[in-house]
Amino acid sequence: MQADALLELDRLALARLGREYMVAAQLNSRTGYAALRINHGDAAYKDTAIDNWMAVSPVYTRRMQRAMGFAGGSDVATIFKGLQLECGFAHQYMDVHFEADAADSGRFWLQSCGPLLETEPRGEDAVRVMCHDIEDPTFDATAVATNPRARMRPVHRPPRAPADRQPHCEWRVFIDHDAPPLVERDITRRMEDTELARLSIRRPEGLEAGGMEDYSGPLLQQLPLERLSRAALVVVVKELAIQHHLLVNSLLMVIADRYGEEAARAVAAFQMTGSAWVVGERLRRSHAANLQGMDALWTTLRLHPAFQPAEYFALQVQRLDDARLRLSLDDCPAAHEALDLGWYWLSARGEDEPLRALLRGIEPRAVLRRTGELIWEVELAAQAAQEEEPLAVQVAKGTVLYQARLKDRVQLLQA
């Protein structure tokens, strides 16, 4: 069994990785929904996106509550803590602030919202779909994981009037003690009954002290990941990787239900091709900027969320020599999912283009060759192939998100 790459990272590198995993989940949405629109029309987007997020946000919210020591609460602060540690509110790409003024009431506001800035050029109708039609049911679904009588309601939200209004939106969150409890949907229960949702993540022991070991204390207005201890960050980053794949799998489940499994696999291939390429580029810049060639490829590949957490994906990356890597996917929980639509299953069915795209995003000269069942060799060509990037990559690179540069909060490492 190969060593877990996350255990080799220090606090700053883990905090960076956590933010990049949040960005990766957002890129998955951009490429996955683009494929949905291309194949099934714009009308397919809204209801699919609602079901996509409602299926899994309660699942991963409860997981993070348990992982970070704030499970069992039913108050607004508990809801906010979960929102601070979920990829739906990707740090810095979405500048979100939280205040709880009582156990049963509070507010949050987005000083700046990256998804809004991406959507506004498409017009007010597109903004309303995102900020009204999708957010209303999905926000309540997230709150229900903590309290079925919790409600989220807008104070103001886009379309913005005036056009430069800030904060971009503000929401009240409250416990309506007289309201009927909301009931989780069947799609949520289906996602709970998966290997990924049941996956156990053990907190590493014996790591150096420093930073918050959990989030059992008071709610912070913002929670930069540098505030967390190294052990806590390992767990949080793994949980963010789980969120990443839960969202992938739920999207594909919803598409399969509506359009068939072949349609879901087509979206999966487009989604992974575009998102994994761009995430590979970003991770090389954030975690292997001082490395070249195979060193950069080996380092970045072991951190890529496509194959994290290690408890779910048993990717083995072996250096054969200075010019070659050997990749293999061993038996792992991902191989035993009854829902065989996720990214793992692209490779399992012999579809190598998404993996090839991931590698080229990290190192443009990478050449992939399958040498066995779930076994590949990677070599470096003398120069990168002179060919047009796949449409999925062009979609991913055409987003504001692709240009986002995230900032470290180094001063918090001293806390």
Image (cartoon, helix red, strand yellow):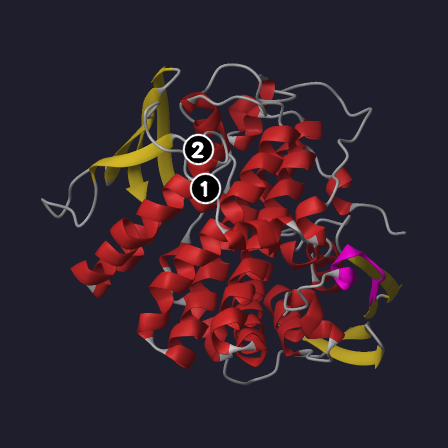
Q: Which mark is residue 148?
A: 2
Q: Point out residue 338 in the picture as x, y percentages from the top left corner.
A: 71, 63
> Residue at 77% across / 75% down in the picture?
379
Quadrant placement of the C terminus? top right
Examine the rendered structure and indicate whether residue 296 appears above or below residue 92.
Answer: below
Mark 2 closeness class: few <14, some 14–19, many ≥20 residues within 10 Å: many
Q: Amino acid at mark 2?
A: Pro
402 and 265: which is toward the camera: 265
Q: Are marks 1 and 2 in contact (CB under 8 Å)?
A: yes
> Residue at 39% across / 78% down in the picture?
40
Specify start and end residues of the magenta stretch as a single range. Answer: 328-336
Examine the rendered structure and indicate whether residue 93 appears above or below residue 247.
Answer: above
Residue corresponding to mark 1: 183
Residue 375: in sight, yes or no?
Answer: yes
> Residue at 78% across / 80% down in the picture?
369
Q: Point out residue 170 in the picture as x, y percentages from the top left corner.
A: 25, 34
Q: Which mark is residue 389?
A: none
Q: Amino acid at mark 1?
A: Val
Q: Point out residue 38 in the picture as x, y percentages from the top left corner.
A: 39, 79
